[in-house]
Image (cartoon, helix red, strand yellow):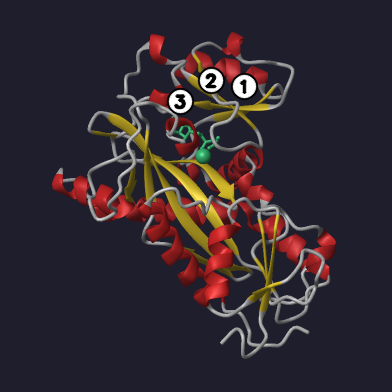
Amino acid sequence: VGKALNLTFRTSQSDTTWLVSALLSSHGLTEVSATNNDFNLLWTGSHPRPHTFSSLRSYQRVNHFPRSYELTRKDRLYKNVARLQHCHGSKHFDFLPPSFIMPNEYRDFWSAHHRLHGPWIVKPVASSRGRGIYLVSKPEEVPMEEPVLVSKYIANPLLVDGHKCDLRLYVAVTSYDPLVIYLYRHGIVRFAAVKYTADQSSLDNPCIHLCNYSINKYHADFVVSEDPSVEDVGHKRSLTGFLKYLRSQGKDVNRLMRRIEDVCIKAIMAATPPVVAACKMFVPNRNNCFELYGFDILVDSDLKPWLLEVNLSPSLGCDSPLDLRVKSAMLSDLLTLVGIPAVDPA
Ligand SMILES: Nc1ncnc2c1ncn2[C@@H]1O[C@H](COP(=O)(O)OP(=O)(O)O)[C@@H](O)[C@H]1O
Ligand SMILES: [Mg+2]
């Protein structure tokens, strides 16, 4: 189809465009150079510039909304959710661990420490893959020189076979006004390579407390499952297998998924006002933009889902058969959902 209609795509600044390119090429779309504006789809790993948005033609699609960082920067997410907590009541928006932007909110952090105690997890405000993250038990250990987000460490994660794990869920937004959100039913569960303990002495071991694949893959005990249909092996598993395991433990999986949907919707709602304002300013046509977000969710031992962060351009890297299965099906569903108009761009 793509060949007959001369459809094209452009990619840039993305370490994970291999899957996008492979999928589009297999449908006959041709990749054009990074300076060619005659494309049907633009797929980039970072935020496009305002000018890129404002020069879009009505049939062109781009995989970001302007100002998506209101959701995907850890400090902005926290600020936007805090605004909704203030307007509508904290109890409806209590899915982020209590957090503080340092050094500005230093006093609030100290008084929270007296009430809640540590450990706390310290994160750079705009980083990824576990880079620069560490745990502390006292406020004195938090640096005052650089902006960081300090969050209450959720010390009672739900354990599977004794290991901490968290969920990577794929959420697509095809429109912010009106808000249209899709939560993809398949996701990836990432495990810490070393068995969980909340002992003080374990706090500096990232392979106990962080579930990032980019950290745990280097551990000698890390296991990659070669067969994605085997659901209880390896340090990366399918969401389906994880939910099946919970069901076998007598847990209310439907309630958990409803709560997760609630978290995803409310987080996106929190970023909606600035994104809609930016769309009015920069985006000429209502269907130009769509976005795929990677939601990182930690489920605690009471089966409460906590939102840890939302990723811009979640990794589409396929290091294992499970990655390939989940991500390729998700991406092809996403592009079907978005639709690439059959217009010759030349
Ligand atoms: N508040 C928290 N409580 C417990 N674990 C956390 C918390 N925040 C982050 N983590 C752990 O640290 C990992 C990295 O945190 P995340 O916010 O996703 O940052 P990054 O952008 O580096 O991936 C998560 O996958 C999770 O395992
Ligand atoms: Mg993360």
Q: Nearer the viewer, residue 213 or 98?
A: 213
Q: Secondary structure at mark 2?
A: helix
| Image marks 1 and 2: residues in contact by CB distance under 8 Å | yes
Q: Give the vertical position of 88 relative to 56 (above or below).
A: above
Q: Residue at x 60, y 39 (%)?
A: 78
Identify residue for label 3.
Answer: 153
Foreground mark, 1 or 3, reads 3
Q: Nearer the viewer, residue 151 or 166?
A: 166
- Quarter of the N terminus within the rendering: bottom right
Q: Is residue 268 above or below residue 107?
A: below
Q: Is mark 3 within 8 Å of ligand 1?
A: yes
Residue 191's x, y, as percent?
36, 36
The image's mark for residue 108 is 1
Q: Nearer the viewer, residue 70 or 167?
A: 167
- Identity of the residue drawn at 51% across and 75% down: 337
Quadrant containing the C terminus is: bottom right
Numbered disc in front, either 2 or 3? 3
Residue contact between numbered discs 1 and 3, judged by CB atoms under 8 Å: no
Q: The disc labelled 1 sits on which kind of residue?
A: Asp
Residue type at tag 2: Ala
Q: Quadrant of residue 68?
A: bottom right
Q: Is residue 295 left or right of residue 344?
A: left
* Residue at 62% in and 47% down: 72
Instruction: Determine contact: label 2, label 3, CB under 8 Å.
Output: no
Mark 1 CB lies closer than 8 A to ligand 1 = no
What kind of residue is marked 3?
Tyr
Q: Is residue 63 above or below residue 77?
A: below
User: Which x, y percent locates residue 52?
Assistant: 80, 65
Residue 112's disc number: 2
